Amino acid sequence: MNSSIKPAYPKSIDIFCKVIDNYGDIGVCWRLARDLKTQSQATIRLWVDDLRSFGKIAPELDPMLNEQIVQGIHVRHWVNDQAFTEQPAEIVIEAFACDPPPDFVQAMKGNTRLWLNLEYLSAEPWVESFHAQPSLQPNGMVKLFFFPGFTAKTGGLLREEHLLSERDQWQNNRQAQEKFLAPFLNAQQLALWQQGAPIINLFCYPSAPVHELAQALVKANQPVLLLVPEGVAPSLEEEITRLEAVAPAPSPLHIIRLPFIDQRDYDRLLWLGSLNFVRGEDSFVRAIWAARPFIWQIYEQQENAHLVKLDAWLASSKTCPSVASIIRAWNNAAAPGSFTSLFQDIFFNPDKCAQWKQQTREYCQNLSENKTLSSSIFDIHYKMAQKV
């Protein structure tokens, strides 16, 4: 947080989240809730409409309970048309325009000091001018449109205070890494990792050209540990089997299916990856903080509107042309079949891959100098308090 501003931490925060694509929205909200709690010690209620999906990334959560405390956060099941009788918090955050219930909104006046609509992440230039813009609401209150982003004129990115130092310690602790991997890998796979076989984490949407990735990995004929969450790329094993049937020799590629794990362990997977395939918003930001090469699949929108946003990020991040070409091909924004050759040319080239790794580390370091999402929220809260 800006050292010139003395924080006036709120005593209570409400966060509303509707689970849209299974894990992305709740992933952001869950991380945000815990980080706001850590920084402020406020009482935080997280209202979620789909506890079953939430439980995939928070194993301590009981999807059958309407009210519970998980890691210090008051988790509430948000049921449509339920009556809200509790007093709204000092800060209310509606994630991604999910619209809190009308009776709750009416009760906010006189109780809530700051009302934010947390928008989706974008690198488009117009975001800077729209960040924190006010909008007068029918209940007489002002709602601010809060845009996360990659520049100092936006709300920043979600990052815990000690995340990068924890990452560095983890990436230099081979013993801790081996202990972490042991439950997921068999003896042969663990031995390959110890001998230097790269780990690739694959998390993608169904539209990703997974068959082209499979072609590249089989053709390379090098030991690779491909870690894939359950339910992601369900036809991957079948595709590998088909390719190996016509290959001159059996491929040393190993596919390891992973159960869904909590967010801290997912961070560690990314920290271990020689390459991380990520999707949407939450895993994308965590891949940035991992400071390892990554390939991002943006959430698809109608009429290819998402490709405009992808190009905006590629430009703002100054991604080198070769890596930008791979990312565009992964998002089906290049010639069909181009991903295989582009991937082989850079990932299996030690010099190019080392350059890629250096660039991602520099990008991570540059972004870490910006304010974080939580500190931006508290800055706005403090300024609002000063006006009272």
Image (tube, rainbow, N blue to C red):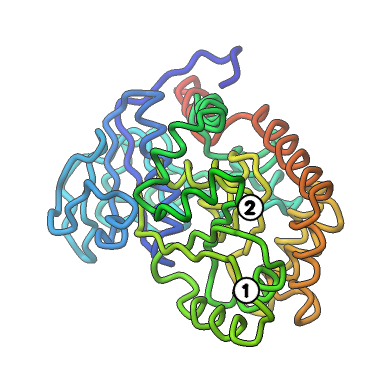
Label 2 near label 1: C-beta < 8 Å? no
Mark yes or no: residue 105 visible: yes
Report the amino acid beneath label 2: Leu
Q: Residue 367 appears in which quarter of the rendering?
A: top right
Q: Disc 1 to disc 2, how far (Cα)? A: 15 Å
The crowd level at tag 1 (other Cα within 10 Å; few <14, some 14-19, many 20+) is many
Residue 280: give its label: none
Mark yes or no: residue 147 visible: no
Query: Mark 1 or 2, which is nearer the eye?
Result: 1
Image location of residue 44, percent across then percent down: 29, 36
Q: Residue 176 appears in which quarter of the rendering?
A: top left
15 horizontally vs 372: left or right? left
Q: Residue at x 78, y 43 (%)?
A: 354
Residue 275: give its label: 2
The foreground one among 122 and 126 is 122
Residue 214: give its label: 1
Q: Residue 368 appears in which quarter of the rendering?
A: top right
Q: Residue at x 30, y 49 (%)?
A: 58
Depicted 148 relative to depicted 172: above or below: below
